[in-house]
Image (cartoon, grey):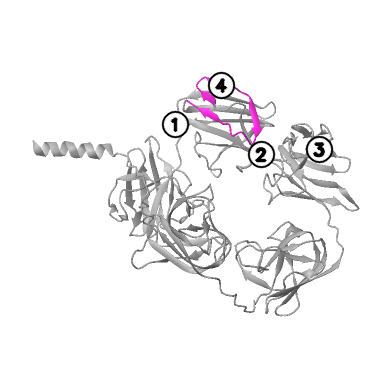
């Protein structure tokens, strides 16, 4: 009887596979820790942040002693990704200064809010981070040493700043006069500038003044010395626009500035919106220069997709914009519905392109008119993207559900939706406007949609709410701004499953994560066949390091030619346990997220 009882208990345990959720601040297991930020020696370089050192007494206690500049900082466990969790202060802007910081707690998470420590006094500091107890402390040791001036050997120096729109990909190259003398001669607008040795990246040291706001004007430069450092992000401030001759001496770390003539820069407009190629990104805004001889007229030719746009004189969402005097003023093959224009910060009215194609746009800021001339054909109709917890891809724009246009302004999609919320967009940008219901929490159910009115706006962040999971046909009509939902049948959304880790081909990059295939006819089961390297791995349903992961119930469960050492699995944020591949080769992996099991079959 005792034996029979043991067998029954054993069978019951094998069948249940209870989900284990672990809460609380468990020790942060890592062999590396880095400082990143303009307060640190290596600045904001995520590829080469400043490393801390694990102590001999406790490998989860890290220390570092060195110079901190005035600026901000946070900490990361690995290099190369801004999407990973960061160690941050418990409250935003926590100060590090000569007073020091007594032992205090810290937080760790990915994404927003992007809290950072604020160093208010430059100096040599001793930092201590205890990852076992989630505490940190900082001691001010002494003022910073004077910078060591060593000749900077380079073939090129570039100037970047307000005068070129902070375009790091195409900065102004200086003329090399000798091994260490480089000269820029040309126009500078009022604003800030700094210099660098390479193009294409902000995560490098820059040539900059010792103190921020060092003035350059008709009388020259306020201080003739510079520093070469990643931080703090000090810049020269050009007080008056003009033609300047700047001379950089890279042997002695000095700068000379000579004002040589009057310069009146041509005005520029920056056009943004989902109808433009650059979307709502200021970095990719469409630049329109004033026409020769008339600083008030701006003419542009190019492709516009369906959607909205507006224009500004500065890259600032809080600044006034050139916009139509009425909302959604249509631009089509017949031109613009009304050509009057206003310059204001509110309301947020925009031109609405209803026919995609090539246009000639004319902004006249003198008589405040706008004209649009349709030149040719139409570009391919853009896709619509669904995101939200009700969709298969969740809140990941990379995995958003794509809906292609059935015809101009009409999008129809059929597929499974989970219970939860969703919205739609034309541009994969969370700061762009979204198609959403006209009322908050508008329900989508077996009866259809509670209210079919639709708006296109950035806020409020209203979303449709699916209250009955199943297969639906969704219809978005962008012309009459309506949304309809038709319930088709019961159906389940199959969530994606990804694998990351040094044992996988994509390493620790979520963008290059290995994708599992859902098994047909087996609820919750996923399979993958491929090569695994020596190392560790774990799995997830969301591309978010702060989200829970599927992992073994204990650390370093081995995967080898014998299979997996233990087939039980947990779904948790910590501790960061992972499977460990000890025999490299081709494997077939099977994960069942319903039964919380994993199987590994070694193939060759």
Which residue ends up furthest to the front in the rendered image?
A: 99
Secondary structure state at the residue bearing disc 4: loop
Identify the element where label 3 is drawn: strand
Residue at mark 1 to residue at mark 3: CA–CA distance: 50 Å
Q: Is residue 454 magenta?
A: yes
| Residue 354 lies in quadrant | top right
Q: Reading the chain from its start, which is encountered first: label 4 or label 3?
A: 3
From this viewpoint, which residue is outermost toward the top?
447
Check disc 1: other Cα within 10 Å, few if <14, some if 14-19, many if 20+: some
Give residue 143's quadrant in the image.
Answer: bottom right
* Image spot of residue 194 (x, y percent): 69, 65
Question: Counting other residues with Cα less than 10 Å from the Cα at mark 3, is it few (<14), some (14-19), or many (20 or more)?
Answer: some
Q: Quadrant of residue 517?
A: top left
Circle number at residue 450: 4
Residue plotted at (72% across, 36% down) = 348
Look at the picture and state if 317 lies above or below 167.
above
- Single out the mark in the foreground, 2 or 4: 4
User: Which is closer to the viewer, label 4 or label 3?
Assistant: 3
Q: Which residue is mark 3?
A: 342
Q: Nearer the viewer, residue 541 or 319?
A: 319
């Amino acid at each position: 009887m005792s034996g029979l009882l043991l067998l029954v208990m054993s069978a019951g345990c094998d069948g249940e596979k209870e989900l284990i959720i672990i809460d609380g601040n468990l020790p942060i297991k890592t062999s590396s820790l880095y400082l990143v930020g303009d307060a640190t020696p290596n600045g904001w370089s995520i590829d080469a942040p400043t490393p801390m050192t694990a102590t001999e007494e406790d490998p989860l206690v890290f220390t570092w002693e060195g110079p901190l500049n005035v600026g901000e900082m946070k900490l990361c466990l690995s290099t190369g990704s801004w999407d990973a969790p960061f160690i941050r202060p418990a409250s935003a802007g926590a100060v590090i200064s000569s007073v020091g910081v007594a032992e205090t707690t810290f937080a760790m998470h990915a994404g927003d809010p992007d809290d950072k420590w604020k160093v208010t006094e430059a100096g040599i500091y001793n930092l201590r981070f205890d990852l076992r107890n989630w505490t940190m402390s900082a001691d001010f040791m002494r003022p910073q040493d004077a910078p060591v001036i060593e000749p900077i050997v380079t073939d090129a120096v570039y100037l970047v700043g307000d005068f070129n729109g902070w375009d790091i990909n195409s900065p102004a190259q200086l003329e090399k006069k000798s091994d260490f003398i480089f000269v820029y001669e040309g126009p500078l607008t009022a604003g800030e500038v700094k210099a660098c040795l390479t193009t294409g990246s902000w995560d490098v040291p820059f040539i900059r003044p010792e103190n921020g706001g060092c003035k350059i004007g008709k009388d020259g430069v306020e201080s003739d010395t510079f520093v070469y450092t990643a931080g703090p992000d000090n810049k020269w401030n050009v007080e008056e626009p003009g033609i300047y001759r700047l001379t950089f001496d890279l042997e002695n770390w000095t700068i000379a500035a000579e004002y040589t003539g009057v310069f009146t820069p041509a005005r520029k407009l920056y056009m943004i919106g989902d109808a433009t190629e650059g979307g709502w990104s200021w970095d990719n805004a469409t630049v329109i220069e004033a026409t020769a001889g008339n600083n008030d007229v701006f003419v542009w030719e190019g492709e516009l997709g369906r959607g909205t746009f507006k224009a500004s004189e500065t890259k600032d969402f809080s600044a006034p914009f050139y916009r139509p005097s009425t909302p959604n003023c249509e631009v089509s093959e017949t031109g613009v519905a009304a050509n009057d224009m206003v310059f204001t910060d509110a309301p947020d009215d925009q031109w609405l392109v209803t026919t995609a194609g090539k246009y000639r746009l004319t902004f006249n800021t003198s008589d405040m008119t706008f004209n649009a001339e349709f030149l040719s054909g139409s570009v391919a109709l853009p896709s619509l993207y669904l995101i939200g917890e009700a969709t298969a891809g969740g809140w990941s724009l990379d995995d958003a559900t794509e809906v292609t246009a059935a015809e101009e302004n009409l999008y129809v999609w059929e597929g499974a939706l989970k219970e939860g919320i969703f919205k739609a967009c034309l541009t994969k940008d969370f700061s762009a406007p979204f198609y959403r219901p006209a009322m908050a929490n508008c329900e989508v159910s077996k009866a259809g949609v509670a209210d079919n009115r639709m708006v296109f706006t950035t806020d409020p962040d209203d979303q449709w709410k699916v209250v009955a999971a199943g297969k639906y046909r969704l219809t978005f009509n962008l012309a009459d701004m309506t949304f309809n939902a038709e319930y088709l049948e019961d159906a389940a959304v199959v969530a994606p499953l990804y694998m990351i880790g040094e044992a996988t081909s994509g390493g620790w990059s979520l963008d290059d994560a290995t994708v599992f295939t859902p098994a047909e006819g087996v609820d919750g089961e996923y399979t993958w066949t491929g090569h695994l390297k020596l190392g560790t791995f774990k799995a997830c349903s969301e591309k978010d390091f702060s989200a829970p992961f599927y992992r073994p119930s204990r650390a370093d469960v081995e995967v080898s030619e014998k299979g997996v050492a233990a087939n039980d699995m947990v779904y948790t944020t910590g501790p960061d346990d992972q499977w460990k591949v000890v025999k490299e080769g081709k494997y077939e992996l099977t994960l069942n997220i319903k039964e919380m099991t994993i199987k590994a079959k070694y193939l060759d």
